[in-house]
Structure formats: structure tokens, C-alpha cells
Amino acid sequence: MARKIRKGDKVKLIAGDDKGKVSEVLKVLPKKSQVIVAGCKIVKKSIKPSDSNPKGGFVEKEMPIHISNVKKVEEA
């Protein structure tokens, strides 16, 4: 029986640039079969100046990873 991955679970990345990292799931996107994992697949996004950020610039954020590239880690 497959165990579903949910927000807050510890997972290990089994593919991609961050292969081998163990981290926590921040968000699950079930319609796209993707998850967002803390500290993995970080990209720099440019943002326009706004009231909250008058200078604009770059922000680092996590991007979604396909659910087949993560494996749930059992906590003992």
C-alpha cells in the first residue's frame, strides 16, 4: 500500500540536482502531482518594485518537484 505524501512529511529527494537531501514538504499540488520541498530546487525570481518592496530586485524561492522524485522517510 502506497503512503500518501502530505504537508509536513519528511521526504528524501531521489532525483534531480538536490538528490539525497532530506527535507520537509511545504505544500502539495495534487492536480499537478507535485510537491514543494523546503530548501530544494531554489531559483532566483526577479520582482518589480511595489509598495511592499520599493526597490524590487531578486528573490529566492522553492519551485515544485514531481512527486515521483521524492520518497517519504519514516521517522523513528
Image (cartoon, rainbow, N blue to C red):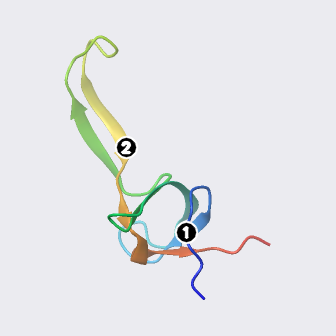
Residue 17 locus on image (x, y percent)? 36, 67
Q: Residue at x 57, y 68 (%)?
A: 11
Pinpoint residue 75: horizontal percent, then vertical percent.
Answer: 74, 70
Q: Is residue 76 left or right of residue 30?
A: right
- Residue 31: quadrant of the picture: bottom left
On the rendered structure, is 21 left or right of 60? right
Location of residue 67 by image quarter: bottom left
* Left-right relation of 60 to 3: left
Q: Secondary structure at mark 2?
A: strand
Q: Earlier in the sequence, mark 1 or mark 2?
A: 1
The residue to which callout 1 is attached is 5
Give x and y (percent) for residue 50: 25, 15
Observer-nearest of 8 and 59 = 8
- Dot 2 amino acid type: Lys
In this view, the residue farthest toward the front is 31
Pointer 2 residue: 61
Q: Up-down: is 36 above or below 60?
A: below
Q: Dot 2, how many residues are within 10 Å of its Cα: few (below 14), some (14-19), or many (20+)?
A: few
The amino acid pointed to by label 1 is Ile
Q: Nearer the viewer, mark 1 or mark 2?
A: 1
- Inter-mark Cα distance, 1 to 2: 21 Å
Task: Using the image as rendered, state which of residue 36 and residue 54 is in the foreground.
Answer: 36
Q: Residue at x 31, y 16 (%)?
A: 53
Residue 22 falls left or right of residue 67: right
**Residue 32: percent from the left, percent from the top?**
32, 64
Query: Secondary structure beneath disc 1?
Result: loop
Judge the density around disc 1: few (<14), some (14-19), many (≥20) Cα neighbours within 10 Å: some
